[in-house]
Image (spheres, grey):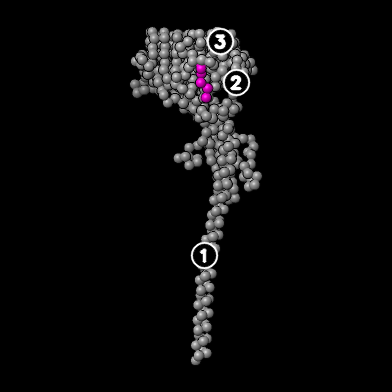
Amino acid sequence: MMKQSGVVTLMTTGLLLVVGLIITMGAYRAALYEIKRAQNEVESRKAYWQAEGGVECGLAQFIPTLTMPEIATPCDAGIEIVPSFTLDESMQEVILSAKAGSHAVSRRFIPSTSNLQSGALQSNGSFVVKGAVNISTPDPGSQLDDGAWDCTAVRFGGSFIGNVSIFNSGVINGNSPYDGFVSDGKDCAEKTVVSGSCLSDSQPQCLLSDFKKDTKLNIFKDFFGVEPQYHDSVRDGGDFVVIDLTGDELGAKSCGAAIIEQLDANVLKLWIEGSCIISSTELAAIKSALNPPGLEKKPITLVVHEGLLALQGAATLDGVIFHFNYDFSPSEEAWNTLDLADSAVAHFPDDYGLAAYYQGGSFSITGGVFFDYPDSSHVSLFRDSLSFHYNRDVIRQAQATTSLFSWKKGAWRDF
């Protein structure tokens, strides 16, 4: 009996050990499974974030010009992630993608679009006009409920001072604001007509709804569809020929000659870096270059960036003038350095310290004029009469920067 009892005890102990071993092995197996799964998740997330990093690497190659690079640069020689750029022709969207392991990440960009506000003459700064202001063709805007047009002649962020007279001719007569426009026999809902001086700050009632004060203007973005801090992407996007006048303090005086040289080569989109002074003789030559005898008129797109802009005589132009100062601020010293006989210094002694633009003679343009300045106190000075014909077709031609793309809303957790 004692032997049998010992055997039973031994068998029971063995069974308990086997059961314990089975339980222990099961626990270890479960633990190993969890460890392996955790490792796989780490590797998976690692691959995902590597792919995200590849997209950001591609983004760094895309953002400077907002155009598709011909050859994408590898992001990391160790893991060999190369971003790829493809064009979705059906949607006209750029797809930026990168792959790491089994994970692929992609983001989309859409063609930049403008959101240009109404107005033939726009500035987020101020205006001072010593001569008559004649709006031969305002921007008609949209039709109101009664059929009248919500016209806009001038849109400004600071103040508007007219010292002689203001006359808005409306949209029924005169040049059409764009091809295919039909007024339906309806004119502007309101047209400013002033005989004598008009100061928007002290006499706001002298300006009607065709002169709109707008303190939220972002003209560069509205015009080009790109935030102002990325202005280099517009300049370097391939549509403009760049003339750099920043190397010489008095290089501004060669601006007119440089423009004429490009126009003679049939280059109509010009981006000037630095101050630009155009003499009356050069203005006449520019007019001739844009109006060849017996041929169709050629509209110019002239962007002047980070400097003063002065037209020293009467100017009659077809096209768009865009004066854009992002970091530059005008000063008395800047004007005095130019040492111009016909300038803001002589004709606007009280205002020239804040003047970014000066027009020395009568000014007439068919198209649009846009001034984007960093401060609403920066002023555009017109010594003589100001006349303009709004032309949407000319403006849209100037805006045609189809190579630029912007971020697609919702493409990267920004929804």
Please state which amino acid type lies under the numbered disc 2. Thr
The structure residue drawn at horizontal position 54% and vertical position 22%, both measured from the top left corner, is: 306
Give the label on residue 340, or none. Answer: 3
The structure residue drawn at horizontal position 53% and vertical position 57%, both measured from the top left corner, is: 38
Q: Which residue is mark 1?
A: 30
The structure residue drawn at horizontal position 65% and vertical position 44%, both measured from the top left corner, is: 77
Viewer can see residue 357: no
Please state which amino acid type lies under the numbered disc 1. Ala
N-terminal of the pair, mark 3 or mark 2, is: 2
Give the label on residue 246, or none. Answer: 2
N-terminal of the pair, mark 2 or mark 1, is: 1
Residue count near mark 2 (Cα–Cα under 10 Å), binned few <14, some 14–19, many ≥20: some
Quadrant of the rendered image containing residue 150? top left
Give the label on residue 213, or none. Answer: none
N-terminal of the pair, mark 3 or mark 1, is: 1
Viewport quadrant of the C terminus: top left
Circles 2 and 1: CB atoms closer than 8 Å: no
Region rendered in magenta: 327-331
The structure residue drawn at horizontal position 51% and vertical position 28%, both measured from the top left corner, is: 228
Majority secondary structure in the magenta region: loop
